[in-house]
Amino acid sequence: MNNEKQAHFIPFHAINEFMLPEYRLKLLQEVFGNFDRLSDQRQSAINRLVKKHVKVAGFRNSVLAPATLKSRAAVSAFERSPEMVAQICQAWFELHTDLAARVVDFLKTRGWEVLPVEADRSVLPGFLTRWPEKDNFVALDDAFAQTYPEDTTHEYDLNMMIVWVSGRLPVELVGEDDTKPEVSIEGEG
């Protein structure tokens, strides 16, 4: 029997199981509402996905729809497409680089292994499934507030950033010694 641990990735759109519908829409609205602040590469990747997966009534080309209409129409694509989730979440991450840097530092102080803040997480195969049992969202929110008392980030945004920065979803809660990366990919979802 092999003693090495294996990483289990689940597709990015699994995040929808952990999101409130209102927050999913807010995330999409924020990305599309700040589209001009994204890199040309990110805009191009998202526009390609919008053309492929999003239909906005009254628009032959959904890319040209106003941000509010496009956001609502993109919800179902976000729920079904791992690539859409990856690009939208990375875009949202890029709109909040200050928070991302704080979260990277914060998680490292708690012993988490995370990619550097400048890494493009959208190229990963999905989310790791192992999550430190001691670090539920309430514990992380409280510890973050103690570490950064001046930070006024809403807990949903903080939790989203923790998930994206760490590349993990709390699917399999494990003890501290069992959270080190592994490597195998679960099926397309």
Image (spheres, rainbow, N blue to C red):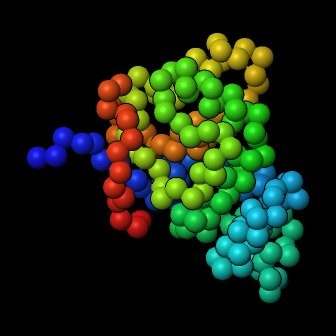
Q: Position of residue 95 (x, y in %)?
A: 78, 46
Which of the two residues, 67 or 120, is positioned nearer the viewer here? 120
Quarter the C terminus occupies: bottom left
Evaluate whether residue 183 shows in this view.
yes
Q: Where is residue 171 in the image (x, y as percent from the top left)?
A: 38, 43
In which image quadrant can residue 101 be found?
top right
Q: Position of residue 61 (x, y in %)?
A: 80, 83
How many numbered marks have been drawn onto this rendered protein structure?
Answer: 0
Horizontal relation, residue 127 to residue 6: left or right: right
Q: Where is residue 135 in the image (x, y as percent from the top left)?
A: 46, 25
**Residue shown at 76%/70% (left/top)?**
44
Which of the two residues, 82 or 109, is positioned nearer the viewer here? 109
In which image quadrant can residue 184 be found?
bottom left
Work out whether 110 lies above or below 158. Answer: above
Evaluate whether residue 25 shows in this view.
no
**Residue shown at 57%/59% (left/top)?**
123
Horizontal relation, residue 172 to residue 58: left or right: left
Which of the two residues, 152 or 182, is positioned nearer the viewer here? 182
Work out whether 72 lies above or below 99. Answer: below
Q: Which residue lies furthest to the bottom in this view?
A: 60
**Residue shown at 58%/44% (left/top)?**
164
**Residue shown at 16%/46% (left/top)?**
2
Which of the two residues, 173 or 118, is positioned nearer the viewer here? 118
